[in-house]
Image: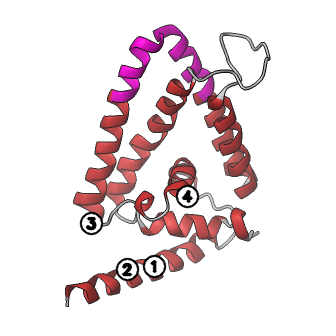
Amino acid sequence: MAKIGLFDLEKHFAFYGAYHSNPVNIFIHMLFVWPILFTSLVILYFTPPLVDLSLPNSLIPNYGLLFTVIYSGFYVCLDVKAGSVAGLLCFICWFFGSSFAHQLGFSLAWKVVLASQIICWTGQFIGHGVFEKRAPALLDNLAQAFLMAPFFVLLEALQMAFGYEPYPGFHARVKAKIDANIKEWNEEKQKKKF
């Protein structure tokens, strides 16, 4: 069933999808979005604890955990089934990111994170510039693009692999919104040429 406001999955998915309609660009994002999240959690491992809580295996209740909880909770609110999968993936990234950061130590971890982020972001900008021919969504709505990117690529993968829809008619409704957005963007682009 469709939700409204902050939890309007159709609106979020259509916004993000309008910037990711080229299959090659979508594939590039599928390769690079989750590694960006993972490496962000690696570097956030080195933030101070937010509460004094002892967790096993060098896990720290810091900003990495806070962002993991926020992302996971938001995804579950958008769609319980796919959101639960996304939330689980977020916690897996936090757990292994924390373990990885603990093993590397800050002096090596930040270099690995920097290299990974450069590679992943470069790939995505190439996807937009060469294949999509449209600027990334983050230039129009930074927070929405960062928050929705992992969930968007997961929903794309679930739809491609299993035909998953959060509810019947979801993809048809979103596709109509994406097509309308792209048409409007193309018309605006044509007006600017003249």
**Residue under label 1:** 181
Q: Nearer the viewer, mark 4 or mark 3?
A: 4
Q: Position of residue 43 (x, y in %)?
A: 50, 25
**Inter-mark Cα distance, 1 to 2:** 6 Å
Q: Position of residue 115 (x, y in %)?
A: 32, 28
Query: Residue, x 57% and y 15% (percent of image)?
Result: 99
**Residue 24 falls in image quadrant:** bottom left
* Dot 4: element: helix
Residue 29, x across and y down, in percent: 40, 49
User: Could you tell me the amino acid type at mark 2?
Assistant: Trp
Q: Which residues are magenta?
A: 94-114
**According to the image, label 2 marks what residue?**
185
Asked whether residue 95 is drawn in magenta, I would say: yes
Q: Which residue is labeled 4 in the image?
A: 144
User: Which image quadrant is residue 8 in?
Assistant: bottom right
Sooner in the amino-acid sequence: mark 3 or mark 2 = 3
Tell me the SS state at disc 2.
helix
Tell me the CA gap for discs 2 and 4: 19 Å
From mark 3 to mark 2, how far is it between C-alphas? 12 Å
Which of the two labelled residues, at mark 1 and mark 4, occupies the earlier sequence position?
4
Amino acid carrying label 4: it is Gln
- Under mark 3, the amino acid is Lys
- Other residues around mark 1 within 10 Å, as few (<14) / some (14–19) / many (≥20): some
Residue 127 placement (x, y as % from top left): 29, 54
Residue shown at 63%/43% (left/top)? 86
Q: Is residue 69 above or below residue 29?
A: above
Q: Which residue is more in the foreground, 179 or 126?
A: 126
